[in-house]
Amino acid sequence: MKPFRKRQLVYCLLAIVILIIMSFTLVACGSKTEAPTSSQQQGANKDLPFKGITLRVGVGSFAGEGVRMFIPEWEKKTGGKVEVVEFPFGELYQKLVSAFTSGVNAFDIVVCASPWMADFAVNGYIIPLDKYWDKKSDWDDVVPSQQALCMFDGKPYAIPLDGDNHMMFYRKDALENPEYQKKFKEKYGYDLRVPKTWKEYADIGKFFNGWDWVGDGKTHYGALEAMKPSDTSVYMLVNRALSYTDVKAVPGSLFFDPDTMEPQVNNPAWVRALTEYVDVKNYAPPDVLTYGGGEVRGYFAAGQSALLVEWSDPGQLANDPAKSVIKGKFGTALSPGSYELYNIKTKQWVKHSEVQYNPFLAWGGWVAAVTSTSKYPEAAFSFADWLDTKENSFKAVITPASARNPYRKSHFENVKGWEEAPIKYVNAKEYLDTIRAAFTQPTTTRDLGILFTGRYIEALDRNMQKAISGQLKPQQALDTCYNEWKQITQEVGLDIQKKLYREQNGLK
């Protein structure tokens, strides 16, 4: 071959190589960088499996701290990042549904009420977790009632973070004072004791209302219950209504007739409950109508009242010396019961010789669910499970203001752990035994958990507030709510609601 032809061939080959290199460069520059999936990250870096991933967690007020306290260690362990977006308690349901349906402010994890699981699962907002369940930490340690709240259609859809039920707190130094015991018996004709019924609760509340029974020169009050709109007040009413409903004779009869889905919200048990609940403002602080869950917990720890019905959170705050003046001065018991219960089938009040207790799993407890829009479901499951390990969950339930209450068997068995906690719980065994008793009564009843649960609860809250403010009589307010509940059921479909309602109450 002649020299010039050799040079020509070399130039051609160089040109081809340059074109190839340029084409690859252009493709690389023109392509968008795809976010790595959690599976790709796991394969790329086993030591930091979620490096480069950021999870968004939507959570309601109260519960934010119980999530945030475990973020730093998970981030260090996995390389992932977590952002928490917190919403006001009363707006959480609508905010989450809006995010689900619009795609705006989408989340990887939602921390919400367990009764919303059916609603979110049927609508495809959250995913079943059975694919990841072989990695679930210590599932058998979770108490059965809380396990059930995480299941839908035979599959796990959420991870438990909390154990919720209503209970009563009382001031031992008030109820056990010999002078007060004498005066109370003179006025009411029976011994002052830890109230077993709502009548006793009201009598004691009125006795201790509006005077200095502490001896500190300040006015103190009889009882505290949340009454603020769009907060936790609606659950206070449901708790009372349950205590008057014969759910032993007719299981599942608190919210609806389980055979017909006829709303029961305006029956005599509910009317009595609302009438008595409205009366609480007469033996509570003057501004109690502005008190939500956070206020009543804090004010009880500050020594404001003799009685309180709430979740178990006040037991954390009242033991915290930085926030409480009543440490060692309070006791716990089941929420009051009744000697007579209303049977929705016979439409009669049934009298009993012993007090009947029907504990309420109000709100059910915070749970963590993975959204169907998450690009990182493995990472989301990992973080949710991290919140629920034996070790981390115990740290949460002994921490004031975490909004996480005992829900694992080990939480109840480790009494010494409570006594040796940073705030040194006093009377820990009594506190834990009360919570456990509420979980395990034969008539313990779940919160409402069907489609559009949030709308039913919002309607109840709005109408009961009209009775509290005096705009309507209790019967009128509940009649209005009855009509709204009927309409919601018709919109969704009676058959599907009936199926879900019966399933949640263990009925075939």
Image (tube, rainbow, N blue to C red):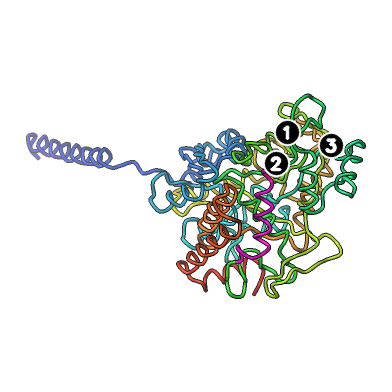
Q: Look at the numbered discs 2 and 3 and tell me whether their residues touch, using CB distance below 8 Å.
A: no
Residue found 47% across the figure and 40% down from its top: 53
Residue found 79% across the figure and 32% down from its top: 326
In the displayed structure image, the side of residue 7 where residue 385 appears, left or right: right
Residue 34 in percent (x, y) is at 36, 44
Kind of residue at badge 3: Ala
Specify whether residue 266 is painted magenta: yes
State whether residue 422 is above or below residue 199.
above
In the displayed structure image, the side of residue 450 where residue 217 appears, left or right: right
Q: Which residues are magenta?
A: 264-281
Quadrant of the image containing the N terminus:
top left
Q: Residue furthest top?
A: 217
Which comes sooner in the sequence, label 2 or label 3?
Answer: 3
Residue 192 in percent (x, y) is at 87, 45
Label 3 element class: helix
State whether residue 103 is above or below residue 179.
below
In the displayed structure image, the side of residue 485 where residue 409 appears, left or right: right
Q: Dot 1 corresponds to which residue?
A: 304
> Image quadrant of residue 394?
top right
Q: Dot 3 corresponds to which residue?
A: 174
Q: Look at the numbered discs 1 and 2 and tell me whether their residues touch, using CB distance below 8 Å.
A: yes
Kind of residue at badge 1: Gln
